[in-house]
Amino acid sequence: MTEELQETVSREDFEDVSWQDEIDSADEQSVDKYSRLFFEKSNELEEKEDTKSARAYRFLGDICSMYLKDNDPNEPFGPEIVTANGRTAILEDFTDEHVELLNYLLEKTTEPELKARIADILWTTQRDHKAGEKAFRSYLDSSDILHDPESWYIGFERMRRAFEIAAMLGNEELKSNAEDFAIEKLDEHEGKDPKFFTLSSIGLLADQDYDNLADLAQRSEKAAEFAETEEKWRKAKQLWMLKAKMERSRGEAGEVVNAETRAGEAIIEEANAARDRSHGVAASHLADAVEVFRRAGKSEKAESAHEAMLKDQEKSTDEMGLIETEVDLTDAATEAREAVSGDKLINALRTFSTITAPPKKQNLEQEAEDLIENHPLSAVIPNTILDGNGKIVAKRGSVTDPDAEEEVIKAEVIRASQRWYRLAVYAGIVPAFEQIARDHRITLRDLVNVCQYDPMVPPGRELIFARGLYHGFQKDYISACSVLVPQIEHFLRYLLMQEGVTTSSLQSDGTQEEFPLNTLLHMDETEEILGEDTVFTLNSLLNSKFGSNFRHRIAHGLLDSSQFGSTIGIYTWWLILHLIFRPIVAGMNDEDESSREEQDKSEE
């Protein structure tokens, strides 16, 4: 919303405007369509110098332009467009000065979609309960009109918003009406809808404490079985896991095991279907299956999936590539965009998670040694590392000092890694990120689905990781890094505990203290699980004073806002996504160890 419009738009601007004609001409009854029509009409009237009517249409366009978010009921709208030069309307643009005009428009419109939007603005900004109730009813009416099994989400999100408003109003009657509406729609489909309406609606009802979980569990089972007949394995997996969640809430342990087992079997089929396309993708699916079977107590099935995963992982190494130090960034960026373009969201995310890889420590060590050899003066002169305020945070000695030679090399290796991270961000991560943002609208629910049964995400931390990743996809790296970076210590602890490794020390007074991040990163078992390169990357990003020392700087408030969105912040966020998608489980060796074993055999 422009500053001029905020100051000047009034009820009088609408007196001679037939704005409902634009609604009647829309080929779809959605605010997205209305917004475009209103803005086009405003521009047309501006050209005719009818500024009064143009303001009216511009205001209506602003009302309709905001998109409906799914992660904060109290802040339900976001701007359609944000650029370096400005943005489209946000909720805060509608001030107390607009209340009378909004109420006037609410009375005049009979179209449910626009009525829901205007009433919701009044409810959210003014806590006008009557407007809230009107928004609730209008959202359900609009959901009914827009309901489409193929393009299911647009109708579903209106229904979801109706549930949110009923909950905020504390109105049990409205909540019951919303439940009846959702059940009616579920009955229409009988679990056979082609997309995800049934899955999402059952999940929504369960989240809203619907009192008949047994019915929802049965519906989920029926839909999962139908999905299997159509070989929609990912959908079947999600429905089985949803059933397991509800059966767990009901205390039906046997049903939980059965549902999780069926989910694991669906994941196996998903891996089989993906294998022709990519052994790496198949291995990632199999890693999920291992975790699901383990949770279900099916150790034999877990072991079988584990063995299959190791075979796929071995074959996947030929599919992967690294961005070398010397690279044409233009070509690399184009390749990164093409790699994630034109695919389903889940596949695009998997590809994005491997768009680059943690740098090879051995390569960086060689680079550092070459630098010292070719430019000895840089290593002869002792080096002092300063922070942004000029304070000394680390000192590096001279390579001429025998006691400091090893430290100098380590410091140069870490400094080389920082250059590598910047290259990886500009050549791969950012171009791929931008392409995914153009192709897909990523919601918090999408990322919750990714994290919920991922073997790398510690139980109970799924929503934390999902929110952190979501913030990153919104380019809110302050929130993303603040949420995710503190979780890495527990993430490592969880992986080690899965291997039966002790992650705490016993003090003389009988108390136990958890090992800090520095200790966890230097444990041999951590390297055995994650591999030398990943452990080095985590250390150079988060823990080393010669590197970014990112975790320390976040924890102690040493970063300004711009530093969160630096290449180090972006790479750290991406690395966590990479780890979540990485197809590894307890006991799995990395490529370096495999290489060492082959070398040992050849020497024998």
Image (cartoon, rainbow, N blue to C red):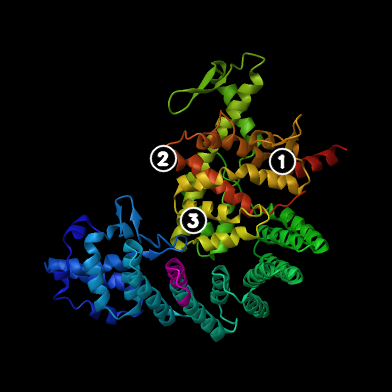
Can residue 590 be seen here? The reply is no
Q: Is the magenta region chiefly helix, strand or loop?
A: helix
Can residue 429 be seen here? The reply is yes
Magenta span contains residue 163: yes
In this picture, is 542 found above or below 285? above
Q: Which element type, helix, strand or loop, lies under badge 2?
A: helix
Which amino acid, by three-letter code, is at mark 2? Answer: Ser
Which residue is found at the position 70% from the left and 70% from the top?
A: 266
Please identify the quarter of the rendering in which residue 235 is found.
bottom right
Residue 526 has which mark?
1
| Residue 3 placement (x, y as % from top left) | 21, 55
Q: Which element type, helix, strand or loop, lies under badge 3?
A: helix
| Residue 106 placement (x, y as % from top left) | 27, 74
> How many angstroms separate mark 3 from mark 1 (CA)?
33 Å
Which amino acid, by three-letter code, is at mark 3? Answer: Arg
Which residue is found at the position 48% from the left and 52% from the top?
A: 471
Q: In which quarter of the image is the C terminus?
A: top right
Query: How packed is label 1: few (under 14 Cα within 10 Å), some, or many (20 or more)?
Result: many
| Residue 440 placement (x, y as % from top left) | 47, 63
Query: How packed is label 2: few (under 14 Cα within 10 Å), some, or many (20 or more)?
Result: few
Residue wearing tag 2: 562
